[in-house]
Amino acid sequence: MNAATAGLAFTAMLPEHLLLLGMVLLVGLEIAGQGGRLSWVLALACVAAAAATAAALAMQGCTAAPFPGHFSVTPATLMAKAVVLALAVPVLLMSHDEFSGGEFPVLLLASLYGAGLMQSADSFLTLFLGLEILSVPVYVLVLLAYRRPQSAEAALKYLVLGGTATAMFLMGVALIYGSSASLGVRTGQAMGLPAFATAMGSHDSIAGTAVVLVLVALFLKAAIVPFHTWAPDAYEAASVPVTAYMAVIVKAAVLLAAVRLFGDTMLAAPLGDLVAVLPLLSIVWGNLAAMRQANLRRMVAYSSIAHAGYLFYALLGAPAGRLQAAVFYLLAYGLFNLLLFAALPKAADDRERDRLTRLQGLFQRSPFAALMIGISMLSLAGIPPFPGFVAKFLIFKNVVAAGHTAYAVLGLLGSYLGIYFYLRVIQLMFMSAGADEQAARPLPRLAIGASLLCLGSALLVLVFPGWTMGWLLP
């Protein structure tokens, strides 16, 4: 490798290098006994720098393949990376008052490193490596965020089902290799993950089984019905920053990797029906189950199951509009989910903090928190003119344009079910008698900062959606 090639490789992987540098420094600080607040500041600086670097490289039109056939970057993949990394900044701001040691930032940076690899994967080898580096630290984070006795059980359930997804993914890859003698590495003509696209178009039973196994593994990672059972327990048992990370960043990384995996392939029956039916069930079941929840994090878990359905609907659309619709939806969904968690009032007991009835009369006790949570609910429900409405419109428009009108109509009808429980939260905060005054605690300054950061970004998306999409996908 000559100096020019090495320089190009270094530049193309600069976001990952910054995260890796942060991990090394954080481990060094822990060994030296100088962690704590300094670890948090260093992690925040590294994640913000990695996000800014990815965005800057995308705006410069950087295109490179440091490891041909395995890892490459384009403006689109760099901007997807920038979005995922930027969404992690509010999570770090929220975590300051939740974790005193340096374990959380190290694990977070390690997981983000995997998310970055997934967005640039050109082969199944790199994709698998990124998926596991993303997932393994999150298993530990659920346990690290110990707030309730069931945290260990939730972490174990997440680990077992995550391991099941890994096994299915590897079995699918093995079958693809068996049917095509390729793992998606460039052979001279094909770039990207051509073996998967070839398997999708094949009538061979082995290739078809391989595609289904890989798809089901992604469904399990994203909590698509009926592979969703880990999500409510894990979301409820973890602390608020970890729940926010799982609900937003992990889901974003998996969905964007799925978009990359499907590439320019147009889905047709029977695979198209599978991609439509299970996400449709997720939309309906997620919204129906969320209505019955008495605590906020389980409600958000079922809400995220429904939103995972909307996101996988993006795969039904035309290949040209998939990435645009998915990135915009993830941005809108992620910002308002993070706004919800950042504005959630603190309490001495984690169970008490999570009860929906504790939100009664919140506007009288904490107007700022109530307004932030209310805005989040309206956007997540898809009420115009909030960005959540625009995001859903883009998804369903692309599905209709691809000829799946019936699925688009059913998905739209299923989305109306979610309006009830979102408006229920607003009713509790603004139209119900206040709960005990003991619960009225001021939000930490960093939580307010995270809320304002999410709100400011969301307003930019709301006022300039066209400009935002043009900037996100140069």
Image: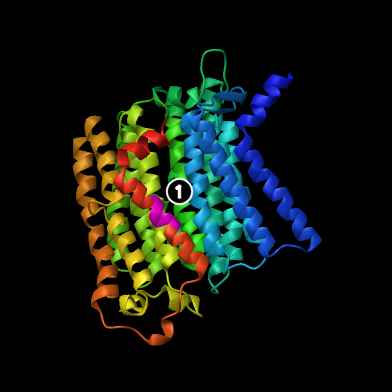
Report if residue 206 lies within the magenta region: no
Which residue appears at 55% of the width and 68% of the height? 151
| On-image quarter of the C terminus | top left
State the residue at coordinates (57%, 19%): 186
103 vs 407, left or right, is right
The 10 Å Cα crowd at callout 1, few under 14, some 14 to 19, many 20 or more, is many
The residue pinned by badge 1 equals: 251
Return the residue nearer the eye: 332 or 239. 332
> How many labels sit on residues?
1
* Residue 454 highlighted magenta (yes or no): yes
Closer to us: 348 or 317: 348
> Is 91 located above or below residue 50 in the figure?
below
Amino acid on which disc 1 is placed: Lys
Quadrant showing the N terminus: top right
Q: Secondary structure at mark 1?
A: helix
Q: Which residues are magenta?
A: 453-457
Most common secondary structure along the magenta stretch:
helix
- x then y, percent, for residue 280: 29, 46
